[in-house]
Image (cartoon, rainbow, N blue to C red):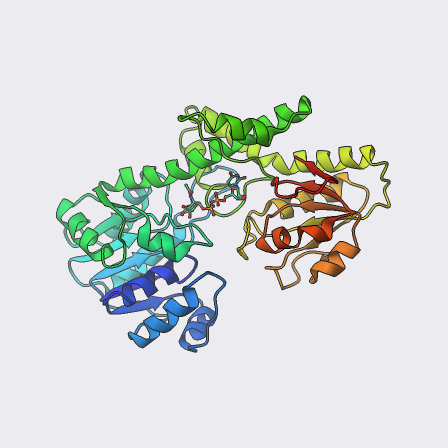
Amino acid sequence: MINVIGLGYIGLPTALAFATSGHEVVGSDCSQEVVEQLQSDVAKFNEPGLDELYREALDKGIRFSQRYERADVYVVAVPTPYDKFTNKVDPSHVVDAVDKILDVAPQGAIIVVESTLSPGAIRKHVRACVERRGLTPDKDVYLAHAPERIIPGAMLRELRENNRIIGCDAPEIGERLKTLYSAFCNGQIVVTDVQTAEMCKVVENTFRAVNIAFANELARICRYEEMDVYEVIRICNMHPRVNILQPGPGVGGHCISVDPRFLIGDYPSLAKVIAAAMETNDSAPDFVLERIRAIMRKEGMTDTTRVGLYGLTYKENVDDVRESPTLQLLELQRRRLAQPLNVYDPYVTRDLVERQYHDLDEFLAANDLVVIMVKHREIIDAMEKLRGKVVLDCHNVCKLPNAYKL
Ligand code: SAJ
């Protein structure tokens, strides 16, 4: 029996994947609302394939509860926020979950943490929690780290196809977990120690953050020279050993914009390139604002020009607004731009910000300058509607003659 703790972005698909591949699963979450919704049999999700997997898991007998249950394996997928001042991970949700697991876990149970943690955090915080209860880690209960690596928008495919890391300091338990995860994971499963697994997860997202920062810096250099950064990157990427990512209006989400900070927080005198990269990415919304102002000057626009931001989510075709560059831009605008900005996002139906539109045509009619902050499928399909408007395209998706690039 597997008890998955935390039924959010990662815990839910993981619980469903275990349940549909022959395991008895109970999913637990502290939120009554989340549990009741999942128990109601009518839950709907904005992730391709998740509705179908949920139905199949219900048929296979998955249960949802606010309580933790006695199980052989616990999978912990709760949030790990970071402290904005120290840049250190806040492991308190993981530690609370483990503490509650220990109330019900039998001797020899395995606790797998999937939540992202900084290197050494399991030893420092989770092992310590086990020891406080008078138990011996890797004897009375086993600890493992199997960091999730799936990307929103393609979660189920990546859950099945991605390679996985299992970090466990007891090798025979690592091998048992490898067999367990191979029930639904067709990728390679690498077994290593806990701290290497923690480090790998954070390093992967840091690699991406640094590469995006490099692209963002190139965008600024090319703008200074009035050159097309996308053409430069396209040509450079034809070299067999060069693979530059794309510049953008900022880096959002709860992974790439957060995980590198753990390395900065833990190794402040060593993580120098990483710190500089984060500064570059953090200032991307400033750069967009500067571009808006420059374009307005060039087009002879005034303070009465109506400016609209297309897209509120942190990236395309998802409904997640965490650390969204558009929200950061709105914050800056309040201080630096004369006119208020209009906003629209097809995936954000609830009212989240002021001057938010809920219809694409109304939004376009209400703006003279449109900034493509997110390249949702909707706007790519409806690009012709932007003809006649001045456009700032932060993703190089608009081929109309009146579109400015970053
Ligand atoms: N972005 C750019 N330029 C690019 C690519 C992305 O500016 O060339 C921006 C996006 O617009 C977005 C942000 O970066 O704002 C992050 O988006 P993403 O699609 O690169 O990644 P996430 O945050 O959705 O998911 C990442 C993934 N990690 C890696 O690709 C190394 C995913 O596999 C992880 O599971 C996830 O973080 C996580 O939970 O850690």
Q: Quadrant of residue 286?
A: top right
Position of residue 184 in the picture relative to residue 136 (left or right): right
276 or 66: nearer the viewer: 276
139 or 256: nearer the viewer: 256
Q: Quadrant of residue 334?
A: top right
Q: Quadrant of residue 25?
A: bottom left
Please give the name of the residue rendered at 40% of the width and 33% of the height, measured from the top-left corner.
266
- Which quarter of the rendered picture does the C terminus lie within? top right
Q: Position of residue 190 (x, y in %)?
A: 23, 43
Residue with the most extreme top position: 225
Position of residue 45 in the picture relative to residue 94 (left or right): right
- Which quarter of the rendered picture does the N terminus lie within? bottom left
Q: Position of residue 239 (x, y in %)?
A: 44, 25
117 or 395: nearer the viewer: 395
Please give the name of the residue rendered at 34% of the width and 54% of the height, measured from the top-left corner.
159
Q: Can residue 341 be seen in the rendering of this structure?
A: yes
Q: How many marks?
A: 0
Q: Can residue 64 be seen in the rendering of this structure?
A: no
